[in-house]
Image: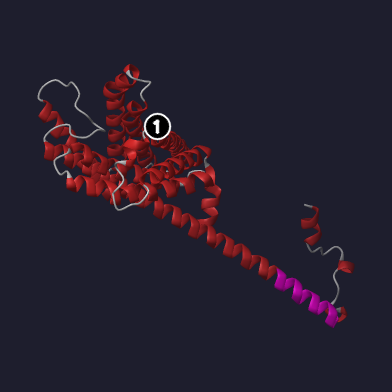
Amino acid sequence: MLSAMAAQPSSKSPAFAPSPGRLGPKSTASGAQHGGAVDGVRGARGAWVHGLGDLATGHAAVAQAGRAVFALAVVGFGAHHLVAGGFATRGIPAWPLPGSATAWALLVGAFLVVGGLSILADWRRRPFALGLAALWSLVLLVVLAPRVVANWRVAAVWTNPGKNLVFATGALLVAACASAGSGALTQRAWTLARLVLGAFLVLCGVEHFVYTTFAAALVPRWIPGPTFCVLAAGVALIGCGLGLVVGGRAARVAGLFAGAMIASWFLILHIPRALSAWSDPGEWSGVCESLAIAGIAWLVSGTNAALPSSLHTEVNS
């Protein structure tokens, strides 16, 4: 405050304001240097603000790409149900329902297709995303949770419930991002999604060490050192999971890297395995699951809910 007060001109103290005639060459040069310094500071600040604008734009592009990838995976889940004429995916397995199981499977499949397309087209995205979150949560509580309770000591039993929880919280984040003027809601949904995704990635990383032989058999033959690849992937998954749990910049980097890593598995592992075993529903479930998790990882990375709203205002002004 004192420096600001000293910088203010005062008409009541003319003795402190030198007349133009008393300004010599030295004073003029000093003033020019001062003006150049001010311009330099303003230019640096403008570049910094524009840089933040580019950064925010980049985060938004990552979030939009993640949302689109997740939506395509949801459409894939639904198409799988419709083509198979039953509950063919691990994310929504068969469960006791009144009436025809086929009719229920087709109804769920149609809802998944429409819900995924609505997210992709940004048409009524919020209600459909909430419906998807409710569907995965219901399956988790009614079908998958009892299996965990009965066999909680088996690490593999936790995998499918973990996936469902990731899908549900990812859908909640999609819905929160579609709510206008709800920064606090988006912040909470982002925190929940990144914590769930982080814990799930740590679980998957640990399972790479527990089931190393099984996972090594899944590595394509043209990739050398399958055991090393499995262990390296386990380390990477644990590192990404911990980064997501930590939050902040670590979460954004971890989400971006995890999404790229899982998307590479979608291309080099799951797609070839599904094409070579066309009638195996488990392989096609793996295709959709890897795509969905990669999309959610990018969505979490790009949402950037931790950035203060005041900074967004400054960048966009």
Give the residue at x 90% y 68%. Answer: 15
Is residue 180 in sight in this rendering?
Answer: no
Q: Indicate left or right for 18 with 51 as reference.
A: right
Q: Nearer the viewer, residue 101 or 159?
A: 159
Image height of 290 relative to 14, above or below: above
Q: Nearer the viewer, residue 193 or 50?
A: 193
Q: Indicate left or right for 144 with 195 as reference.
A: left
Q: Nearer the viewer, residue 46 or 239?
A: 239
Residue 31 image offset from top left, x and y in percent? 78, 74
Give the residue at x 52% y 52%. Answer: 313
Q: Nearer the viewer, residue 212 or 117?
A: 212
Is residue 219 in sight in this rendering?
Answer: yes
> Which type of secondary structure does the marked residue at label 1 adopt?
helix
Magenta span: 24-37
Q: Which residue is mark 1?
A: 210
Q: Quadrant of residue 32?
A: bottom right
Q: Quadrant of residue 287?
A: top left
Question: Callout 1, which amino acid?
Answer: Val
Image height of 253 relative to 187, above or below: below
State the predominant SS element of the stretch in magenta. Answer: helix
Q: Indicate left or right for 209 with 110 as reference.
A: right
Image height of 10 relative to 258, above or below: below
Give the residue at x 44% y 35%. Answer: 202
Q: Indicate left or right for 121 with 187 as reference.
A: left
Residue 74 image offset from top left, x and y in percent? 25, 42
- The residue sitting at the top extreme is 150
Give the residue at x 33% y 34%. Answer: 163
